[in-house]
Image (cartoon, grey):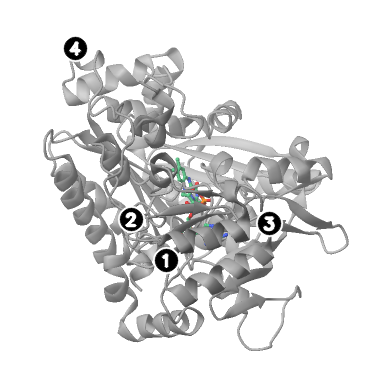
Amino acid sequence: MDQEKSYRHLLKWGDRREETVSHHMAELIREKFGLNDEDFTRKHLPGTDPVKLDKPPVLKPAQVEFLKKVCGEENVLTDDFSRARFSCGKFYGELLDLRMGFVPDPPDAVVAPRTHGEVVRIIEFCSEERIAVVPAGGLSSVTGAVRAPQGGIALDLTRYLNRVIEINRVNKTVTVQAGMYGPALEAELNRQGYSCGHFPQSFEYSTVGGWISARGAGQASTGYGKIEDMVVALKAVTPAGVIETREYPRTAQGWDLFRVFAGAEGTLGVITEATLHIFNYAPQNTASAAFIFRSFEAAVETMRGIMQAECGKPHLFRISDPDETDIAFRTSGFDGTFADRILTMLGFRPGSRCLMFVTVEGERDYARFVMKKIRRKARAGKGMYIGTSPVRKWLEQRYSSAYMRDPLMDLGIMTDTLETAVTWDKLLNVWKAAHEYVSRRPKAFMMIHISHVYENGANLYFTFLSPMEKGNEKQDFASFHRGLVETILANGGSISHHHGVGRVLAPWMEGHLGKSSMELLRAVKKHLDPNNIMNPGGTLGL
Ligand SMILES: Cc1cc2nc3c(=O)[nH]c(=O)nc-3n(C[C@H](O)[C@H](O)[C@H](O)COP(=O)(O)OP(=O)(O)OC[C@H]3O[C@@H](n4cnc5c(N)ncnc54)[C@H](O)[C@@H]3O)c2cc1C
């Protein structure tokens, strides 16, 4: 069997390596979930069958011919494997579907435009012919935002529209095509002495257009901002015409129209170019520190104090709650060491202690100055400085940890994440309520961290693990997931902080934003996309 053409090839993360869980992780899940040796010898729902679709295309042959005429024959793919590849992102429910050999929402064709002009012609044609268009970047969406429930075309922006157009050293901005992946952009900027400052965990396999459209946040967002803070102008092709905004530092000319596309998830048009702020590339200046606190509450209070002190901001700023800290210690082999015993003796006990990681980047003296203030505040908050190497180790594995989900699913373990934004006054309520909700499920556990921090609040990021209910994997996950989302919202969290909404979280949009706000979003959509061809079928609750 051709492994390259199987569902397994599609469902795996990144470079599709065959990962296994580490020895320490295996021990942990044996203990928590009662797995035995045999469970480790077979793969649950491996998805190794070749991809075969049974959904006939709705595109007419003449329409396919037109697209080929615009983009070139070789840039319009209609084979089953390409259609399946562009039918979903990396949401847990989508991975389960692939493992079961199920592709519910394939596009009829994958079209790779070579220029902005070709995108214009495609969108005009598709709008006239009422053909659905799903813009596709790296397909790393975890919210079901890249499905094609109405068929039509997936627009692959990564194949050709993947270059830096200009680095403007005077304005300190870069203008880049939307299909450019993170590493290529960063490499080009580094060569010129700059950095993009946006490093989501999916950095290696996500694109500028996807970052903007899902309103993402990188791991150093506390210092550099979310992606919408970095965009200064963009060019987007909508069925109502091209919207091209100019670059200004700030204006007061009505709304900032480029912001309409930040978070639009492909429902309004196709972003073809964006101009972003860039930052100095000076990793040698980065000051870092790890601290340990006796409780989550103490760590959060210190974090808030640092953010509200107006003494400069960290770039990376994270707290792992006690569950995440315990698992980090256990899976890194720290548990039971001499250092662990000392920490416990000092009152930093398993079950309540919390790790905090900080970096400050930028000009050397600035980084040192801010770090000095942070260390002072951490000490005042009864945090203990534990060196820089935990931060370095975390940074070394920050992209590779994403590979863990596939071997865990192979072991029959449900594992997914959710995230929210919440103000400081409600943060502990959401944290407690989410843990309380998960504790009601036998053999489930959850780790929570804070990783994007603001003056008035922060995000909470939830990673949960539990054995799958074999034979009822999808329903079981859907009801568990629904309950967790509802718990977060009921306690004051937002639907999303940086993953976007997609189709997975869309059912909560109207209730959460309110009817009038939804009507406004729908009115903008109706104006820009009167025939509802842009990423139709529920994204964002539109
Ligand atoms: C392992 C893993 C880790 C992740 N970590 C993070 C993280 O740390 N931070 C974070 O923010 N997100 C994270 N994500 C989520 C995801 O990577 C982000 O949402 C990312 O921004 C999506 O980019 P993409 O290029 O893959 O877009 P896609 O998944 O291809 O598309 C996402 C949405 O954007 C639309 N879109 C894409 N390109 C365009 C365009 N040019 N014009 C108009 N619409 C477009 C699509 O239609 C879709 O609605 C993670 C995902 C995974 C699987």
Q: Residue 38 — which label?
A: 4
Q: Name the outermost residue toward the right.
A: 170
**Pointer 3 residue:** 177
- Specify few, some or many for label 4: CA neighbours under 10 Å numbering under 14, 14-19, or 20 or more: few
Q: Amino acid at mark 2?
A: Leu
Precedes in sequence: disc 3 or disc 1: 1
Q: Position of residue 45 (x, y in %)?
A: 23, 29
Residue nearer the viewer, 221 or 388: 221
Labels 3 and 1 touching (C-beta < 8 A): no
Label 1, label 4: how far apart the Cα atoms are: 46 Å
Q: Nearer the viewer, mark 2 or mark 4?
A: 4
Q: Quadrant of the C terminus?
A: bottom left
Q: Given this view, does label 2 or label 1 mark the residue nearer the observer? A: 1
- Asked whether the viewer can see residue 79, the reply is yes
Q: Is residue 324 above or below residue 40?
A: below
Q: Position of residue 344 (x, y in %)?
A: 37, 24
**Amino acid at pointer 4:** Glu
